[in-house]
Amino acid sequence: MRYATKSVPEPKAILQAWLPFKELVGVTGVHSEEDYAQACATIDVLLDEVGDDENHPLADVLDYLADQVKAYEDENFVIPEAEPNEVLKFLMEQRGLKQDDLGDIAPQGRISDILTGKRSISKEIAKKLATHFHVLADVFL
């Protein structure tokens, strides 16, 4: 099969760029809990830097790592059928998070109301939670 390309670098050139990247980031593929933890920590740092700017130079790195994490989660973490607030509790427990850790998503009081079932999760908050936890927003709606 023939692909339309600009030019393809030699494998040696790719390796020369890849190894320093891998050493700097600490993970390029997620195959273990240690890789998973490193990738999630790196994603959090990148999210703080990139935000919603899809044109940011690091957005592709963020997308790449998020895809690696998602593939690992799909294979290793089963999210049971549950109410949205239960899914949120589960994801928070899995990552050792407290309500205060979600302060950039919603005020602590609102997170508390969501967790106790007193308040449903709005579409806006569901989108933010989905981005934070690297899942589809549907699990929160």
Image: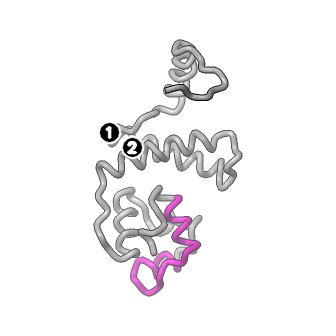
Q: Main secondary structure of the magenta part?
A: helix
Where's the C terminus, which quadrant?
A: bottom left
Secondary structure under the numbered disc 2 in the rendered image: helix
Most extreme residue toward the bottom is 118
Badge 2 local density, few (<14 within 10 Å), some, or many (20+)? many
Q: Is residue 32 above or below residue 8?
A: below
Q: Residue at x 42, y 35 (%)?
A: 29
Packing grade of label 1 (10 A; few <14, some 14-19, many >=20) is few
The residue beneath circle 1 is 32
Quadrant position of residue 14: top right
- Report the amino acid beneath label 2: Tyr
Q: Which type of secondary structure does the marked residue at label 1 adopt?
A: loop
State yes or no: residue 118 in magenta. Answer: yes
Q: Is residue 81 above or below residue 66?
A: below
Q: Is residue 13 left or right of residue 140?
A: right
Mark 1–mark 2 Cα distance, whole angstroms, equals 6 Å
- Residue 68 highlighted magenta (yes or no): no
Residue under the point 60% across and 20% down: 8
Q: Is residue 3 above or below residue 108?
A: above
Rendered location of residue 33, percent (x, y): 33, 42
Q: Are marks 1 and 2 in contact (CB under 8 Å)?
A: yes
Residue 127 on image: x %, y % = 55, 66
User: Which range is magenta?
Assistant: 110-131
Q: Residue at the spot x=67%, y=25% of the render?
A: 6
Q: Which residue is mark 2?
A: 36
Q: Amino acid at mark 1?
A: Ser
Look at 47% across and 85% down and name the residue there.
119
